[in-house]
Image (spheres, rainbow, N blue to C red):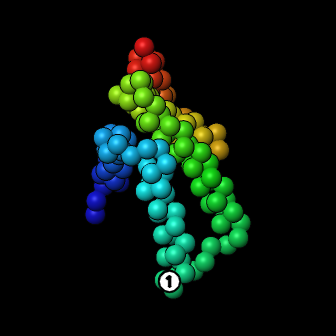
Amino acid sequence: MLNPLFFCLVAAFCFGVWPVISRYSGLNQTWVMITAGSPAILYPLYLVIKNVDKPEPKALLIGLIAGAINAIGFLAYTKLIGWQGQDISRLIPITLTMTPIVIAVFGIMVFREPMTIHRIFGLILGISAIYLLSR
């Protein structure tokens, strides 16, 4: 069985590489959104084609809200990538460092996850990284 950290590494690698590839491709922001948004169309199609259980309406609504929030974040992220004159090597790492900080804080606040010394140290390191990258 594979370690979940392997999937974390793969996801982090892919999420960190795609902005560089997108900018290198020369596509404008609209085409980046179209190509990256394709999975949003494919998933509902999968539910129709496959014989799978449909989600409950409440779960579907929450999923749609989460998707809308993600889309707003994605719009901001693609804006950063296409923002000429700004250092992609500074902005994207700051963005990607903020993501686990937000998740950790919300995990503690919303899901009552324990505030361990490791989490505190990780949050301090993440905030320090953002500070150093923003200089």
Residue 38 image position (x, y, % from top left) = 46, 62
Residue 83 image position (x, y, % from top left) = 46, 31
21, above or below 47, in the image? above
Towards the viewer: 13 or 39? 39
Mark 1 belongs to which amino acid?
Ile
- Identity of the residue drawn at 49% across and 76% down: 46
Q: Give left or right: position of 30 versus 64.
A: left
Towards the viewer: 74 or 94? 74
* Quarter of image, res 85: top left
Tag 1 secondary structure: helix
Q: Give left or right: position of 113 versus 11.
A: right
* Quarter of image, res 121: top left
Towards the viewer: 78 or 64? 78
- Identity of the residue drawn at 50% across and 83% down: 49
Considering every residue shown, the one lying at the far top of the view is: 135
39, above or below 134, in the image? below
- Identity of the residue drawn at 65% across and 44% down: 110
30, above or below 53, in the image? above
Residue 119 image position (x, y, % from top left) = 47, 33
Towards the viewer: 12 or 39? 39
Considering every residue shown, the one lying at the far bottom of the view is: 51
Asked if residue 92 can be seen in this view, the reply is yes
Quarter in which the C terminus is drawn: top left
Q: Give left or right: position of 20 versus 129.
A: left
Quickly name the residue at label 1: 49
